[in-house]
């Protein structure tokens, strides 16, 4: 019902999760929202254009516990070993745990408008701005501790963007109707802080890099610039990998101009993007004839980078074998 001109609502909730440390099981999440329905004002009640005109704003805090079960607990893992010819199973440290692990909190502001036009179309527009604090990220720790990483609440990140939705009743008759809808979202993100030192975080042999000023988990790889031809193979001035190349292989950018293409975590590795789409969109349509209805949906995304992790890791040659020959 839109009988009222002004709307105001507020909530507060307190949630607990056994996934977090014993010191921080609980989180408090408040929110408030307000709206103004302009079409219920006298100056718009006789409008021939707007069936509904509403502006609204909201601010609230949400929490994320998107981590594995028992992550906050110290754990062991089994390993195989042999005493001479006798195989045995033992245990070694797996994860140090973190009793202070807590909710990742996001404070989000949303400003939007809802419009109804000519009794045939509806339009919704939103601007959102979210600041996430206490990010749940795996932090690199010195190998001398016996561990490789530790999950911590570290750093903050900003996400902002726009959303728009349009729905139109193109044909509206008793036995026949045709509806068309469109929606689009534009999203950006930037890491603001990363712990006391601000040092970048590396994951998966440095395939993923999170650093201040960039998006979350940027992809670190060799920059592909083409395909090697036989002429490239025969040309000593064309940079090639230390491990032999052949015609048809990828051609990569020689960043340091030394004539050799290093592994992606060497001098020739660059940040090539991230897997977060900049645009998400969709189009839907529905045709109705009496009791029959046909509908179709088209959706997509744009701006995300997809990286072959397997190829990147195999190119490291950790086992001194030609693992990337396939």
Image (cartoon, helix red, strand yellow):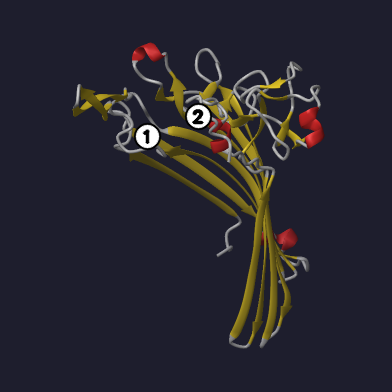
Asked if residue 163 can be seen in this view, the reply is no
Say which label, 2 or 1, has the lower sequence index. Answer: 1
- Identified at 66% across, 18% down, the residue is 267
Say few, some or many: other residues with alpha carbon within 10 Å of mark 1 (under 14 / 14 to 19 / 20 or more).
some
Asked if residue 102 can be seen in this view, the reply is yes
Q: Is residue 43 above or below residue 174?
A: above
Q: Position of residue 245 (x, y in %)?
A: 68, 31
Q: Position of residue 112 (x, y in %)?
A: 65, 49
**Which quarter of the figure is the C terminus placed in?**
top right
- Check disc 1 and report its element: helix, strand or loop: strand
Q: Position of residue 220 (x, y in %)?
A: 62, 28
Q: Residue 261 is drawn in which quadrant?
A: top right
Q: Position of residue 186 (x, y in %)?
A: 68, 45
Q: Which residue is mark 1?
A: 27
Q: Nearer the viewer, residue 102 or 138?
A: 138
- Identified at 61% across, 22% down, the residue is 212
- Could you give the CA–CA distance between mark 2 and mark 1, rounded to whole angstroms? 31 Å
Q: Nearer the viewer, residue 267 or 42?
A: 267
Q: Residue 85 is drawn in which quadrant?
A: top left
Q: Nearer the viewer, residue 102 or 207?
A: 207
Q: Nearer the viewer, mark 2 or mark 1?
A: 2
Q: Nearer the viewer, residue 103 or 61?
A: 103
- Identified at 40% across, 21% down, the residue is 148
Residue 204: mark: 2
Say few, some or many: other residues with alpha carbon within 10 Å of mark 2 (under 14 / 14 to 19 / 20 or more).
few
Residue 192: mark: none
């Amino acid at each position: 019902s839109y009988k009222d001109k002004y709307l105001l609502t507020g909530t507060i909730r307190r949630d607990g999760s056994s996934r977090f440390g014993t010191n921080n099981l609980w989180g408090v999440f408040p929110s408030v929202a307000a709206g103004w329905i302009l079409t219920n004002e006298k100056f718009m009640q006789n409008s021939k254009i707007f069936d509904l005109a509403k502006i609204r704003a909201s601010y609230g805090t949400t929490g994320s516990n998107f981590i594995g079960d028992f992550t906050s607990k110290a754990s062991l893992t089994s390993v195989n070993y042999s005493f001479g010819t006798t195989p045995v199973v033992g245990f070694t440290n797996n994860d140090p745990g973190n009793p202070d692990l807590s909710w990742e909190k996001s404070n989000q502001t949303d400003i939007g408008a809802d419009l109804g036009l000519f009794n045939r179309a509806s339009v919704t527009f939103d601007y959102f701005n979210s600041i996430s604090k206490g990010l749940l990220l795996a932090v690199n720790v010195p190998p001398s501790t016996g561990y490789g990483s530790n999950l911590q609440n570290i750093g903050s990140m900003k996400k902002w963007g726009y959303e728009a939705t349009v729905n139109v009743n193109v044909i509206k008759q008793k036995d026949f109707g045709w509806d068309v809808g469109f929606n689009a979202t534009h999203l950006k993100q930037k890491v603001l802080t990363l712990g006391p030192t601000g040092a970048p975080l590396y994951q998966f042999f440095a395939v993923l890099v999170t650093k201040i000023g960039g998006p979350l988990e940027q992809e670190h790889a060799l920059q592909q610039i083409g395909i090697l031809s036989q002429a490239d193979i025969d040309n000593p001035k064309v940079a090639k990998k230390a491990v032999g190349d052949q015609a048809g292989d990828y051609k990569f950018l020689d960043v340091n101009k030394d004539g050799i293409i290093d592994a992606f975590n060497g001098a020739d590795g660059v940040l090539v993007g991230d897997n977060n789409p900049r645009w998400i969109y969709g189009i839907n349509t529905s045709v109705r004839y009496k009791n029959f209805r046909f509908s179709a949906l088209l959706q997509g995304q744009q701006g995300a980078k997809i990286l072959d992790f397997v190829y990147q890791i195999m190119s490291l040659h950790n086992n001194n074998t030609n693992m990337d020959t396939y």
